[in-house]
Image (cartoon, rainbow, N blue to C red):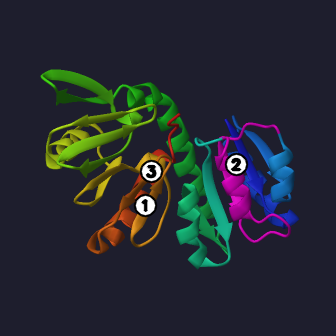
Amino acid sequence: MRIAICDDEKEITRHLAEITGKCCPEAQICTYMSGSELLLSDTSIDILFLDIQMDGKNGMETARELRKSNKDMIIIFITVIEEYVFEAFDVGAFNYLVKPFDDDRFIQVLQSAVERYHEHNLNAAEQYQKYILVKTGGTHMKIQTDDIIYAEVFNRKIIIHKRESDLEYYGKMSELENALFDAAPEEFFRPHRAYLINLGYVKKYNVSTVWLEKGTALIAKKNYSMLVKAYLRYNQKYSQSARQ
């Protein structure tokens, strides 16, 4: 397990690295003084504490670059401005620390991240084995839940948009919703009566639209706050588990 700390305040970086080493003696600790230095490193990182307000490439820009090649990394943002938390979760942050914070708070978040790391490794194989059965043309088809990006209702048909192809069939969205919620609780959300999305494929969203890795979905105004909460819970639990 590799844990990295990226902060342009040398004393903070040194102190957090020291605490991390004591709490996780089995881990390899890496420190970086800038986002650019971190991005140039070829070290594979499992848990990252990343300062947002840094000179040059800030933490948010750095995180977006990192996410292009590493969807599993557990990112904890460090910030002096609490409002950044909403933007932080758009890049799949696991948690955030608002300066100034004490050692106990840091240790609490660190331990939670380490638990999530071990939980993900233990359950990775199981996650990929979740599936539902869809009846189409008299045939039952097995579909892995990880393969589903989103589903929509169009011309009285349900279209399931998968990573490699789409599946169309006559059915009810409520039945698909129940099947997915039974198979993969907290991984799917229905933002609109005509759409059902996999939270693992969300790229960004605003009050009316969710952009996914393949396509978009509408959000009913009354469901927006619930979507934000569901996406936050998803990130905290799964830390953007791999879906490639």
> Which residue is label 2 attached to?
66
Could you tell whether 96 is left or right of 233 in the image?
right
What's the residue type where badge 2 is placed?
Leu
- Residue 164 in the image: state x and y as whole percent: 45, 31
Residue in the image at 77% along x and 66% along y = 58
Q: Which residues are magenta?
A: 42-69
Between tags 2 and 1, which lies in front?
A: 1
Q: Secondary structure at mark 3?
A: loop
Pointers 2 and 1 in contact (C-beta within 8 Å): no
Side of 181 where 57 appears, left or right: right
Residue 66: give x, y in percent of width and height.
70, 48
Q: Amino acid at mark 3?
A: Gly
Q: Which mark is residue 61?
A: none
Q: Alpha-carbon neighbours of circle 3 within 10 Å: few (<14), some, or many (≥20)?
A: few
Q: Does the magenta portion include 237?
A: no
Image quadrant assignment for residue 134: top left
Q: Is residue 130 above or below residue 19?
A: above
Residue at disc 1, secondary structure: strand
Q: Secondary structure at mark 2?
A: helix
In reply to whether residue 51 is colored magenta, the answer given is yes
Q: Which mark is residue 215?
A: 3
